Image (spheres, rainbow, N blue to C red):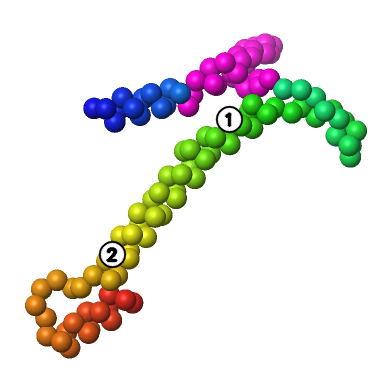
């Protein structure tokens, strides 16, 4: 039960910033109303030195998505990789269970390491 509550709290916290930056847009066509949501992160304009055109900088957006990628993608992959490595090493270096004849143990070891 606490794990479920914790999962809901984390999910709400992850999505909370989007509640403040999402905006509903509408465009009326001749016979159709088109609506969509879009992010409008706070930012500022800087002049690109190469093209001399204004460029929108949104550091809050960059920070948010960087944190999301690290927390929801990189850390789980690293944890799963380490756990799988531990499992593989444990299985690889463990002895085959049961009573075996010496020649049978050698055959089993060769098969396990293939």
Q: Give residue 50's position: percent from left, percent from top.
A: 89, 40
> Which residue is drawn at the image coordinates 38% and 23% (left, top)?
9
Q: In this rendering, would 48 be left or right of 110?
A: right
Q: Give residue 14's position: percent from left, percent from top.
A: 48, 27
Q: Give residue 87's position: percent from left, percent from top.
A: 30, 60
Q: In this rendering, would 24 be left or right of 88?
A: right
Q: Secondary structure at mark 2?
A: helix
Give yes or no for contact between labels 1 and 2 (Cβ–Cβ under 8 Å): no
Residue 31: numbered disc: none
Verify whether residue 23 appears in magenta. yes
> Which residue is drawn at the image coordinates 14% and 71% (left, top)?
97
User: Which residue occupies the foreground of this view, 30 or 74?
Assistant: 74
Q: Secondary structure at mark 1?
A: helix
**Quarter in which the N terminus is drawn:** top left
Q: CA distance from mark 1 to mark 2?
A: 38 Å
> Which residue is drawn at the image coordinates 29% and 70% (left, top)?
92
Verify whether residue 46 appears in magenta. no
> Which residue is drawn at the image coordinates 57% and 16% (left, top)?
20
Q: Quadrant of residue 91?
A: bottom left
Q: In this rendering, would 91 be left or right of 65?
A: left
Residue 64: numbered disc: 1
| Segment colored magenta | 14-42
Residue 90: numbered disc: 2
The answer to whether any part of residue 35 appears in the image is no
The answer to whether any part of residue 66 appears in the image is yes
Q: Residues within 10 Å of mark 2 (few under 14, many from 20)?
A: few
Earlier residue among tags 1 and 2: 1
């Amino acid at each position: 039960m606490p794990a479920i509550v914790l999962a809901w709290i984390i999910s709400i916290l992850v999505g909370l910033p989007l509640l403040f930056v999402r905006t509903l847009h509408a465009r009326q066509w001749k016979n159709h109303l088109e609506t969509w949501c879009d992010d409008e992160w706070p930012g500022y304009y800087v002049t690109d030195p190469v093209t001399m055109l204004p460029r929108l900088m949104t550091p809050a957006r960059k920070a948010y998505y960087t944190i999301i990628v690290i927390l929801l993608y990189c850390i789980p992959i690293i944890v799963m990789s380490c756990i799988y490595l531990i499992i593989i090493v444990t299985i690889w270096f463990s002895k085959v269970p049961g009573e075996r004849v010496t020649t049978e143990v050698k055959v089993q070891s060769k098969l396990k390491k293939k």
